[in-house]
Image (cartoon, rainbow, N blue to C red):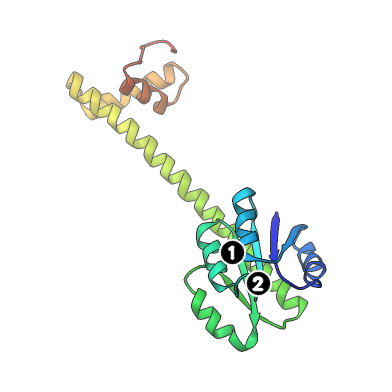
Amino acid sequence: MKVILVSNSSNALPLFKEILKGLNLTNIIQLSSINEAKQKLRQEKYDYVIIQAPASDEFGTRGAKEIAISQNVGVILLVKSSIYDQVLYQVRESGVFVVAMPSTKQVLYQSINFMVIHQEKVKALENEIQKHKKKLQDEKIIMRAKLMLVEQYSWSEERAHKFIEKSAMDQSRTKLQIARELLEGNFREGGKN
């Protein structure tokens, strides 16, 4: 897992390397600006971004929101405790985690761990959604092929279904493959194309 740390502090990288090591996040780079982070994210895939406000080019709130919304990464924004509530309100709908500073290593570790767990759950849900979308798309193709058979041959939906199912079994192929071939006009009964 790859991490971008946006910080102007020379002590930040060693501290975060120590904290992140416990979470198996050992591939970490430090940048000084939000724009550098955005550019790096366009060039390479990173999993997490930690921003220690203020960054060299902006405070960090706007950049953290933009990164969280436009990239599929977890974002933590570290801010002074005196403005924590205000910043939390500003980023509340973007998915940015906000941590009040100064803080202990344990609190930082727990906050980053929470973000990691949250991102893993989000990615698992996104994968599940993609699987369901694909299944629905496949079912639509099969339904269109059935409809075509019903219209062309005046078959019942059940007969069209059985035809596609039997053709798939006989040819050791999927119903989706048979349906696509039927729709494209490339279907040959009893053999593979």
Residue 130 picture location, percent across and down: 47, 46
In three-dimensional space, the C-alpha distance between marks 1 and 2, rounded to whole angstroms, equals 25 Å
Residue 14 picture location, percent across and down: 82, 68
Q: Is residue 145 above or below residue 167?
A: below
Q: Is residue 184 above or below residue 127?
A: above
Residue 121 figure quarter: bottom right
Instruction: Please name the residue that numbered disc 2 is placed on.
Output: 55
Residue 175 picture location, percent across and down: 40, 27
Q: Residue furthest bottom?
A: 82
Q: Secondary structure at mark 1?
A: helix
Amino acid under disc 2: Ala
Q: Is residue 53 above or below residue 36?
A: below
- Which residue does the image show at 64% across and 79% down from the upper left? 79
Residue 110 figure quarter: bottom right
- Which residue does the image show at 55% across and 80% down from the upper left? 87
Amino acid under disc 1: His
Instruction: Please name the residue that numbered disc 1 is placed on.
Output: 118
